[in-house]
Amino acid sequence: RILSCDSHFTGLGCNSCVANYYGTECGKYCKPVSGHYTCHPTTGSKVCAGKRAGIDCDDCVDHFEGNNCERCVQNYYPTGSCNNLCLSNPERYICTNEGDKQCLQYRTGSDCEDCVANHYGEDCSKTCHETSSYTCDESGEKDCKEHFYPPQICDTPCVPVTGNYTCNKTTGDKICAEGKEGEDCDECQNRNKEGVNCEKCIDNYFGNTCSKFCQETTNTSTSYTCDGSGNKDCNEHYYPPQICNTHCKLVTGNYTCNQVTGERICVEGKKGEDCDECQNINKEGRNCDKCIENHFGENCSVHCNEAQGNYTCDQNTGEKKCGADYYPAQECNIYCQEVQGNYTCDSDNGERICVEGNKCKEG
């Protein structure tokens, strides 16, 4: 009979370890601590409870903390496993309870490092949707495509048209070429000009500024053509120069034309609007070279009308030649026929001259 066992042994055969000792030699001491560890029934090694670790199980396994190692250390998820690292970045994302990155609004990418489509800037809050008039640069600013203005707005199209306009690079407004105007700068400022470059005058306008008007005409009152400067070039028989509103065509024997005014210059001895009348009203004929009826003398100033019956007329001088028994000369208006023995007739006045001693009888 064994009276006592070696240290740390017990039992009838001293083949068991006393409480809290383990191992073949019962040399391993281990006393369980509730909530921290138990002891391995064979080796006596400490078996840490839950998420505890360390020699004395007073530490937590990686990524756990707390009195009972019940929670994840900062930035590890989810609770219970704490095996997902998620470093908080409030400018890009938040971490879910599972430790997944939840991108902030308008962000995308594995680390939420990119902006979603059409968003730009540090916080991806700047929007820019590419259109037919612009693209978007890295900062989200509008980058106008060719021929769109103004910068950053790009809502005004302007394609330069040679000869009509260029484009204001700031506003996109059309800058009309010199001499042009209108919405598309395709009209001439000078309304009397035309052509691609407003380089020529419209019909009937002349001069460097096309301000001189001249329209060819051949009507009865005015007749002229226009020279290269717009000056009136009178057609034949129209006067005065540059006016051309007086018609005068020389008529031989009637008139010539004043070369300055176009007025008719009657030939000597003629008068009247058409110079077809004789200045001497007692003359007639194309050249006023003969006397009208019953007028005689160099100036046709002597009147003599044989139709009165008492005389005839000298065809050169117009002097009256009294008929028989008519007196006095040049008047011939007194009748006196001599009665022999009774009276004779006075040749100066036609009075009867009684024969001496006789008394003249009237009759």
Image (cartoon, rainbow, N blue to C red):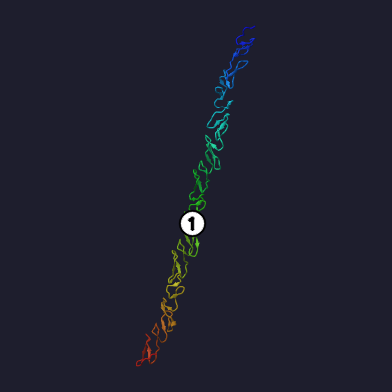
**For residue 298, side relative to residue 59 (left or right):** left
Q: Quadrant of the N terminus?
A: top right
Residue 343, how many percent across, how many down? 37, 90
User: Residue flagged by tag 1: what amino acid is it?
Assistant: Tyr
Residue 106, how many percent across, how many down? 55, 35
Is residue 283 visible in this depiction of the protein?
A: yes
At x 54%, y 37%, the residue is 119
Q: Which residue is mark 1?
A: 205
Above or below — where is 152 with respect to 27? below
Identify which residue, 88 or 6, lies in the foreground.
6
Query: Within 10 Å of the Cα at label 1, are there few (<14), some (14-19), or many (20+) other Cα atoms?
Result: many
Q: Quadrant of the C terminus?
A: bottom left
At numbered mark 1, what does the secondary structure look like: helix, strand or loop?
strand
Identify which residue, 154 or 224, lies in the foreground.
154
At x 56%, y 20%, the residue is 59
Residue 248, how many percent across, how many down? 47, 66
Identify which residue, 194 or 299, lies in the foreground.
194
Is residue 63 visible in this depiction of the protein?
A: no
Above or below — where is 144 with respect to 52? below
Q: How many marks?
A: 1
The image quarter containing residue 32 is top right
